[in-house]
Image (cartoon, grey):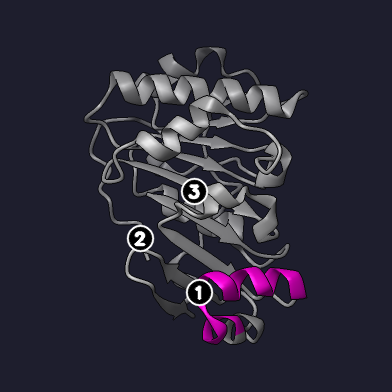
Amino acid sequence: MITVINGRREQGKTTLAYFLSLRRPTRVIFDPRRMFATSPVIISDPLELFELMDEVPEIIVQPETDVQNVFLRTAQEFREWILQNPEEPACLLVDESRFIDTPNITYEPFEAILRFSPTQLVDVVMTSHRPSDIDVNIRAIADFLIYFRTTQEHDLRVIVQRCGEGVGEIVQALPDKNFLVWDDRIALYRVEKDTDKWRVDLKAVNSLSQVNNGSTQATHSL
Protein backbone atom coordinates (compact mmCIF):
# COMPACT_ATOMS: atom_id res chain seq x y z
CA MET A 1 0.00 0.00 0.00
CA ILE A 2 1.39 3.39 -0.96
CA THR A 3 0.37 6.43 1.09
CA VAL A 4 1.54 9.97 0.28
CA ILE A 5 1.04 12.66 2.92
CA ASN A 6 1.27 16.36 2.04
CA GLY A 7 1.30 19.15 4.57
CA ARG A 8 3.02 22.27 5.77
CA ARG A 9 5.28 22.30 8.81
CA GLU A 10 3.73 21.73 12.23
CA GLN A 11 0.53 20.23 10.85
CA GLY A 12 1.35 16.67 11.88
CA LYS A 13 2.27 14.87 8.66
CA THR A 14 5.34 13.13 10.13
CA THR A 15 3.44 12.05 13.23
CA LEU A 16 0.61 10.71 11.09
CA ALA A 17 3.07 8.84 8.87
CA TYR A 18 4.59 7.14 11.90
CA PHE A 19 1.18 6.21 13.27
CA LEU A 20 0.32 4.55 9.97
CA SER A 21 3.63 2.69 9.88
CA LEU A 22 2.86 1.00 13.18
CA ARG A 23 0.43 -1.40 11.58
CA ARG A 24 3.44 -3.34 10.25
CA PRO A 25 5.63 -5.32 12.68
CA THR A 26 8.85 -4.50 10.79
CA ARG A 27 9.53 -0.86 10.01
CA VAL A 28 12.36 1.09 8.40
CA ILE A 29 12.22 4.86 8.79
CA PHE A 30 14.32 7.03 6.51
CA ASP A 31 14.76 10.18 8.56
CA PRO A 32 16.93 12.86 6.93
CA ARG A 33 15.70 15.56 9.34
CA ARG A 34 16.42 13.47 12.46
CA MET A 35 12.87 13.81 13.72
CA PHE A 36 12.48 10.31 15.12
CA ALA A 37 13.59 8.80 18.42
CA THR A 38 10.96 6.06 18.47
CA SER A 39 13.45 3.17 18.32
CA PRO A 40 16.69 2.45 20.19
CA VAL A 41 18.18 1.34 16.87
CA ILE A 42 19.35 4.39 14.91
CA ILE A 43 21.93 4.01 12.15
CA SER A 44 23.59 6.36 9.69
CA ASP A 45 24.75 3.68 7.27
CA PRO A 46 22.34 0.95 6.06
CA LEU A 47 25.14 -1.61 5.67
CA GLU A 48 23.64 -3.83 8.39
CA LEU A 49 20.00 -3.00 7.71
CA PHE A 50 19.09 -6.42 6.31
CA GLU A 51 20.33 -8.22 9.43
CA LEU A 52 18.73 -5.68 11.74
CA MET A 53 15.35 -6.20 10.10
CA ASP A 54 15.57 -9.82 11.21
CA GLU A 55 16.29 -8.83 14.79
CA VAL A 56 14.35 -5.68 15.74
CA PRO A 57 10.97 -4.29 14.68
CA GLU A 58 12.05 -0.73 13.93
CA ILE A 59 15.21 0.76 12.47
CA ILE A 60 15.70 4.48 11.93
CA VAL A 61 18.14 5.53 9.21
CA GLN A 62 19.50 9.04 9.78
CA PRO A 63 22.08 9.87 7.11
CA GLU A 64 24.98 12.08 8.13
CA THR A 65 26.04 12.95 4.57
CA ASP A 66 25.11 12.03 0.99
CA VAL A 67 21.42 11.62 1.74
CA GLN A 68 20.51 10.33 -1.70
CA ASN A 69 23.17 7.62 -1.77
CA VAL A 70 22.18 6.49 1.72
CA PHE A 71 18.56 6.32 0.59
CA LEU A 72 19.53 4.23 -2.44
CA ARG A 73 21.30 1.72 -0.22
CA THR A 74 18.45 1.75 2.28
CA ALA A 75 16.00 0.90 -0.50
CA GLN A 76 18.32 -1.85 -1.75
CA GLU A 77 18.50 -3.49 1.68
CA PHE A 78 14.75 -3.15 2.28
CA ARG A 79 13.98 -4.60 -1.15
CA GLU A 80 16.30 -7.54 -0.59
CA TRP A 81 14.75 -8.25 2.81
CA ILE A 82 11.17 -8.33 1.54
CA LEU A 83 12.26 -10.60 -1.30
CA GLN A 84 13.91 -12.98 1.16
CA ASN A 85 10.92 -12.76 3.53
CA PRO A 86 7.94 -12.84 1.15
CA GLU A 87 5.37 -13.61 3.85
CA GLU A 88 6.50 -10.92 6.29
CA PRO A 89 4.67 -7.57 6.47
CA ALA A 90 6.89 -4.48 6.52
CA CYS A 91 6.79 -0.72 6.08
CA LEU A 92 9.25 1.76 4.60
CA LEU A 93 8.57 5.30 5.80
CA VAL A 94 10.29 8.11 3.89
CA ASP A 95 10.03 11.41 5.72
CA GLU A 96 10.48 14.73 3.92
CA SER A 97 10.75 13.25 0.46
CA ARG A 98 12.16 16.36 -1.17
CA PHE A 99 15.57 15.34 0.18
CA ILE A 100 15.63 12.31 -2.11
CA ASP A 101 14.40 14.34 -5.12
CA THR A 102 12.32 11.68 -6.83
CA PRO A 103 11.19 14.08 -9.61
CA ASN A 104 14.79 14.13 -10.84
CA ILE A 105 16.39 10.93 -9.53
CA THR A 106 15.22 7.37 -10.16
CA TYR A 107 16.10 4.82 -7.49
CA GLU A 108 15.64 1.44 -9.11
CA PRO A 109 15.21 -0.60 -5.89
CA PHE A 110 12.70 1.93 -4.59
CA GLU A 111 10.78 1.77 -7.86
CA ALA A 112 10.71 -2.02 -7.48
CA ILE A 113 9.38 -1.72 -3.92
CA LEU A 114 6.64 0.64 -5.08
CA ARG A 115 5.57 -1.31 -8.15
CA PHE A 116 6.16 -4.97 -7.37
CA SER A 117 5.62 -5.42 -3.63
CA PRO A 118 2.42 -7.14 -2.47
CA THR A 119 0.12 -4.38 -1.27
CA GLN A 120 -1.40 -6.56 1.44
CA LEU A 121 2.02 -6.96 3.09
CA VAL A 122 4.26 -4.03 2.24
CA ASP A 123 3.51 -0.38 2.95
CA VAL A 124 5.38 2.67 1.70
CA VAL A 125 4.54 5.94 3.45
CA MET A 126 6.01 9.19 2.14
CA THR A 127 5.70 12.73 3.46
CA SER A 128 6.30 16.03 1.69
CA HIS A 129 5.46 19.70 1.98
CA ARG A 130 4.05 19.89 -1.54
CA PRO A 131 2.73 17.37 -4.08
CA SER A 132 5.50 18.38 -6.50
CA ASP A 133 8.16 17.20 -4.01
CA ILE A 134 7.27 13.64 -5.04
CA ASP A 135 7.53 12.40 -8.61
CA VAL A 136 4.22 12.42 -10.46
CA ASN A 137 4.72 8.77 -11.43
CA ILE A 138 4.82 7.83 -7.75
CA ARG A 139 1.78 9.92 -6.95
CA ALA A 140 -0.02 8.29 -9.87
CA ILE A 141 0.20 4.83 -8.28
CA ALA A 142 -0.48 5.90 -4.68
CA ASP A 143 -3.38 4.13 -3.00
CA PHE A 144 -4.02 6.95 -0.54
CA LEU A 145 -3.31 10.66 -0.84
CA ILE A 146 -3.57 12.61 2.40
CA TYR A 147 -3.75 16.39 2.44
CA PHE A 148 -3.48 18.77 5.36
CA ARG A 149 -4.56 22.37 4.70
CA THR A 150 -3.19 23.55 1.37
CA THR A 151 -3.48 27.09 0.05
CA GLN A 152 -0.71 27.46 -2.54
CA GLU A 153 -2.31 27.89 -5.95
CA HIS A 154 -0.13 25.46 -7.89
CA ASP A 155 -0.52 22.77 -5.23
CA LEU A 156 -4.28 23.18 -5.29
CA ARG A 157 -4.32 22.73 -9.06
CA VAL A 158 -2.54 19.41 -8.65
CA ILE A 159 -5.06 18.30 -6.03
CA VAL A 160 -8.05 19.38 -8.10
CA GLN A 161 -6.75 17.59 -11.19
CA ARG A 162 -6.50 14.35 -9.25
CA CYS A 163 -9.40 14.55 -6.82
CA GLY A 164 -11.85 17.18 -8.12
CA GLU A 165 -12.95 20.73 -7.36
CA GLY A 166 -14.83 19.72 -4.23
CA VAL A 167 -11.74 18.23 -2.63
CA GLY A 168 -9.74 21.33 -3.51
CA GLU A 169 -12.26 23.56 -1.77
CA ILE A 170 -12.28 21.39 1.36
CA VAL A 171 -8.48 21.19 1.58
CA GLN A 172 -8.17 24.99 1.46
CA ALA A 173 -10.43 25.35 4.48
CA LEU A 174 -9.20 22.54 6.73
CA PRO A 175 -8.49 23.54 10.35
CA ASP A 176 -5.06 22.88 11.84
CA LYS A 177 -4.24 19.18 12.31
CA ASN A 178 -7.27 18.05 10.28
CA PHE A 179 -6.68 16.28 6.99
CA LEU A 180 -8.46 14.83 4.00
CA VAL A 181 -7.90 11.22 2.94
CA TRP A 182 -8.36 10.49 -0.77
CA ASP A 183 -8.76 6.75 -1.44
CA ASP A 184 -7.72 6.44 -5.05
CA ARG A 185 -8.83 2.82 -5.24
CA ILE A 186 -12.48 3.88 -5.07
CA ALA A 187 -12.17 7.62 -5.82
CA LEU A 188 -13.75 8.69 -2.53
CA TYR A 189 -12.61 10.96 0.28
CA ARG A 190 -13.25 11.62 3.92
CA VAL A 191 -12.04 14.20 6.44
CA GLU A 192 -10.33 13.14 9.65
CA LYS A 193 -10.91 15.51 12.58
CA ASP A 194 -9.93 13.37 15.58
CA THR A 195 -6.33 14.32 16.30
CA ASP A 196 -6.17 12.13 19.41
CA LYS A 197 -6.67 9.07 17.22
CA TRP A 198 -3.26 9.32 15.60
CA ARG A 199 -1.16 11.36 18.03
CA VAL A 200 2.10 9.61 18.96
CA ASP A 201 5.33 10.90 20.49
CA LEU A 202 8.18 10.89 17.97
CA LYS A 203 10.74 11.55 20.68
CA ALA A 204 9.88 8.58 22.90
CA VAL A 205 10.84 4.98 22.22
CA ASN A 206 7.69 3.09 21.29
CA SER A 207 7.00 -0.14 23.15
CA LEU A 208 6.43 -1.79 19.77
CA SER A 209 10.08 -1.01 18.93
CA GLN A 210 11.63 -2.97 21.75
CA VAL A 211 11.32 -6.61 20.75
CA ASN A 212 10.26 -8.21 17.50
CA ASN A 213 8.17 -11.11 18.72
CA GLY A 214 5.89 -11.26 15.70
CA SER A 215 2.84 -10.29 17.73
CA THR A 216 2.26 -6.75 16.45
CA GLN A 217 -1.27 -6.48 15.13
CA ALA A 218 -2.37 -4.35 12.19
CA THR A 219 -4.48 -2.01 14.31
CA HIS A 220 -2.90 1.35 13.51
CA SER A 221 -5.05 2.55 10.66
CA LEU A 222 -7.43 5.41 10.01
Q: CA distance from mark 1 to mark 3?
A: 19 Å
Q: Which of the pair 182/176 is nearer the observer?
A: 182
Amino acid type indicated by mark 1 = Cys
Amino acid type indicated by mark 2 = Ser
Give the quarter of the image for residue 212: top left
Give the quarter of the image for residue 99: top right
Is label 1 in a helix, a strand or a loop? Answer: helix
10 Å crowding of disc 3: few (<14), some (14-19), many (20+):
many
Q: Earlier in the sequence, mark 2 or mark 3?
A: 3
10 Å crowding of disc 1: few (<14), some (14-19), many (20+):
some
* Residue 186 visible at all: yes
Residue at 40%, 65% (x, y): give it.
Answer: 184
Residue 125, label in figure: 3
Q: Residue 119: percent from the left, percent from the top?
A: 31, 45
Amino acid type indicated by mark 3 = Val
Q: CA distance from mark 2 to mark 3?
A: 12 Å
Secondary structure mostly taken by the magenta-highlighted segment of the chain: helix
Quarter holding the C terminus is bottom left
Residue at 46%, 77% (x, y): give it.
Answer: 192
